[in-house]
Amino acid sequence: MEKLYELAKVLRSKNSGPFELTLDILFDDKEKYDHVKNSGKLTAESVSVLYHVEIESIRHLVFFDQALGIKITLLREVSSGTIGDRDVYGAQQHAPLMNILID
């Protein structure tokens, strides 16, 4: 078993407007991308558990085969820049993905 961060070339997060957060997982190797994609470990259900959000908060979970990338977009609990926002740019939200174990 390997952790997702060991397989991915890039793991990052960013705002997708003030109300959404996008998580990007990019690979530099098709074999690694296919391994993660086919593992069944990245689903709306697993992301909702990992981020402690309702499954309805996950707007998109898309596998882009041509780009060897996975994009996950979820609703932010607090809009960017408002009181209570701890990460105005959404740049530190990818960490929970890092340790997902891929069989």
Image (spheres, grey):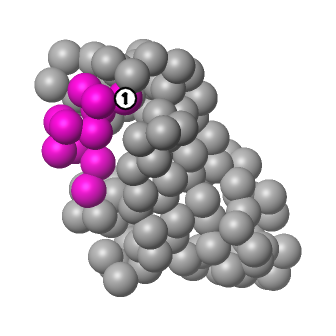
> In the rendered view, does 75 fall on the left or right side of 100?
right
Q: Quadrant of residue 40?
A: top left
Residue sitting at the far front: 66
Q: Name the residue under label 1.
A: 33
Residue sitting at the far right: 81
Camera sees residue 64: yes
Q: Which residue is drawn at 29% across and 48% down?
A: 42
Depth check: give the residue in front, 3 or 70.
70
> In the rendered view, does 63 fall on the left or right side of 26?
left
Q: Residue at x 72, y 49 (%)?
A: 91
Q: Where the N terminus falls, by quadrant?
A: top left
Spot occupied by residue 68 in the image (x, y as percentages of width and height): 47, 34
Q: Give the range drawn in magenta.
A: 33-43
Q: Residue at x 22, y 43 (%)?
A: 41
Q: Quadrant of residue 29?
A: top left
Decide whether the magenta segment is chiefly helix, strand or loop. helix
Depth check: give the residue in front, 35 or 47.
35
Q: Where the C terminus falls, by quadrant?
A: top left
User: In this rendering, is residue 61 above or below 40?
Assistant: below
Mark 1, other Cα within 10 Å: few <14 / some 14–19 / many ≥20: many
Spot occupied by residue 14 in the image (x, y as percentages of width and height): 70, 54
**5 within the magenta span:** no
> In the rendered view, does 40 fall on the left or right side of 30?
left
Q: Label 1 is placed on what type of residue?
A: Tyr
Mark 1, secondary structure of its residue: helix
